[in-house]
Image (cartoon, coloured by chain):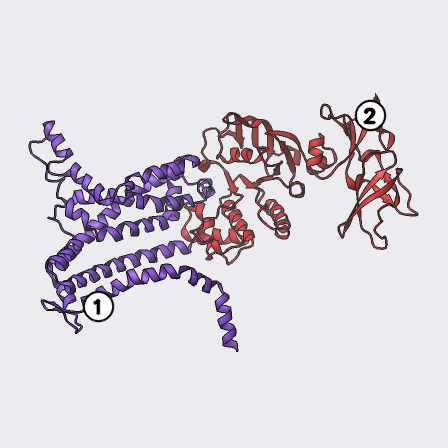
Chain colours: A purple, B red
Amino acid sequence: MEQGAARGRFRNSEAANGLALVSPTAIYAILLLAAPLAAVVLYSLMVDSKVGLSSGLTFDNYLKVWTGRIDQALMIRSLTVSSVVTLVTVLLAYPVAYFVSFHVKPERKSMWIFLITIPFWTSYLIRVFLWKVILGYNGVINSGLMSLGIIGEPLTIINYSLGSMIMTLAHAYAAFAILPIFVSLEKIDRSLLEAGQDLGESKLMTFIRVTLPLSMPGVIAAVLIVFIPTIGDYVTPELIGGGKLPMIANRIEAIMLKQNDKALGSAIAVTAMLIVTVVSVVFLLLNRRFLRGQSK
Amino acid sequence: MTTTEKPNMIEFRDVHKYYGDYHALRGINATIKAGEFFSLLGPSGCGKTTLLRTIAGFEDISSGAVLIDDKKMDDVPANKRPTNMVFQSYAIFPHLTVEENVGFGLRRDPRSKDEKAKAVAEALEMVGLKGYGKRAAHALSGGQRQRVALARALILKPKVLLLDEPLSALDKKIREQMQVELIKLQREVGITFVLVTHDQEEALVMSDRIAVMFEGQIAQLADPETLYRRPNSRKVANFIGTMNFLPAEVLSEGAGGIEVEAQGFGRMTLSTDQVMAGEAGQGAVVGFRPETLTILYDSQTATDREVMGTIEEVVYFGDMTYYDVKLDGTTEALRISMRNVFGRPVLEIGTRARVAWSPGALVMFR
């Protein structure tokens, strides 16, 4: 009797309505995200030989990945590149977001945001390729400088280098970093800034003591949004790095498709995912700390 | 030092402010005395908040001068002025605790950490928030936020405390309680308070003096009683409390006073300080407050004068009853408010009533 009543309550409850609403998306997500993911995890515990995947489960692949010099080096390179890209992107995005939020007239803000997204109207691949045109061995910069007689032969610093990869990635993710920071700046009650000055702080100190901490949730969101996709980026190392500076995604591709070792490739993939998870969780916890102080 | 000789704390000298073409402040001239509880009262858009913000330094002025403690504030930025503000939204920093909020302005204070902590605790105690220091700012109610805002401003011992509609977001009970607390606090600390409000009752309750503002100008600057009893225009009279008006005309003017004939009341003599300038094209009127007329019961006699009327509407408020009474010979009903007294029933619509009045309680606008 009581159970029946409880079930009735559940059927009418907001929770039930909510579940009903998300179920199509949830089913889609489970089929196309969770299931393949589970398959990858399963593969990573098997052994891939010429006859096919073994049925027994083993940690051998992980041992190979974690002790393998190439895998370690590429993982570190991926982490370094994505960390630097994240740092550069967020540092460059913050002033832009700040400018739009604080110095653009309210009626012009949406236009500015619209303009910022314009680079995204072309595909990522094409944008990366355009950077290759600019930075490449025979690219715009090198041939321009050479025709001006400033340099005698193409600069190697700007092509096939980590620097040019970072530049390309930072540009590719700029808008993703600007938007969350902009939103968090928009949410700041402007009277708080006046209060900061009223209590004796200069504009700079008010920024440091009020604006910056209050915009941290946006900064952390930007960090995650840039860091997570760049660590697994495949296109930029391939095109801009010229395949000479592979990152972990290129390694997975090589193992999986060229060496046809699905099990080992899966183990690398899962390892990379675990590292991303750890970093993300750290930032999420940081974000929770900032959010806790602010929820109204 | 007598009260009249208090030094000036704030002085406005022909202050004008334009926002583009919009003339927000139109020649403000006023002085606020040290230790005074001063209110800027007016409807929204009258420029009262703009004027307050010129004191704080958040608003530049287009011409004229604002002086605080006899010093021109033209080039003094907000963070260097001897003023602190309680914002309408309270502007409590959401990422800080209560004590961090209160101690925000003490960063450059040369005192030791312990002394500062003690000062914060004292400030919290002063506003009745003892023991709330460790709480997160977002966990506070509206009234508590306001107390934090007060403590945060007063801990810096400003020469002037600016309050921008500080009570408007609170519900009625807490608002009335805070009004009394603010008055007490002001007496205790002795700091000049400048309050912006659109609530006439609040201004009357709290202020030593009130500047009533309309359309960027000060219409009248006076103490609450003068403002209420002798408003200098119909506009001020209507904004502060309720006032009844009856058409009137001046019969003769002499040294002894002004002979007036008013509809319903008949002839009377008013002293010159009862007569104010009216507005062009509106005709002369006499005005009186609802509580200055009394409906007489059976055996009562009027102390001064008496007229007859008919009760047209009765509004019962518990402690008070409002009667709309049409006096014989008038065209419109007048509002009379009567305190309800035990043993006297509320009168019914249609009752003929004797109404006691006195020429001394009237003002005339001509």
- Which amino acid type corresponds to the residue marked 2 in the rendered image? Glu
Q: Nearer the viewer, residue A46 or B220?
A: A46
The chain letter under disc 2 is: B
From the top left corner, tell me how far across and down residue B138 is, in percent. 47, 54
Q: Residue furthest left?
A: A152
Q: Is residue B291 visible?
A: yes
Identify whether A137 is placed above or below A226: above
From the top left corner, tell me how far across and down residue A46 is, in percent. 16, 69
Q: Identify the element where label 1 is drawn.
A: helix
In which quadrant of the rendered view does residue B303 lie?
top right
> Taking A195 as reference, is A148 left or right?
left
Q: Nearer the viewer, residue A137 or B187?
A: A137
Identify whether A252 is placed above or below A176: below
Q: Residue at x 89, y 37 (%)?
A: B307
In which quadrant of the rendered view does residue A34 lie?
bottom left
Identify whether B64 is placed above or below B290: above
The residue labelled by disc 1 is: A42
Q: Identify the element where label 2 is drawn.
A: strand
The residue labelled by disc 2 is: B249
Instruction: Using a 10 Å C-alpha cutoff, classify the residue at mark 1 as few (fewer than 14 neighbours), some (14 to 19) or many (20 or more).
Output: some
Q: Is residue B2 visible?
A: no
The chain letter under disc 1 is: A
- Which amino acid type corresponds to the residue marked 1 in the rendered image? Leu
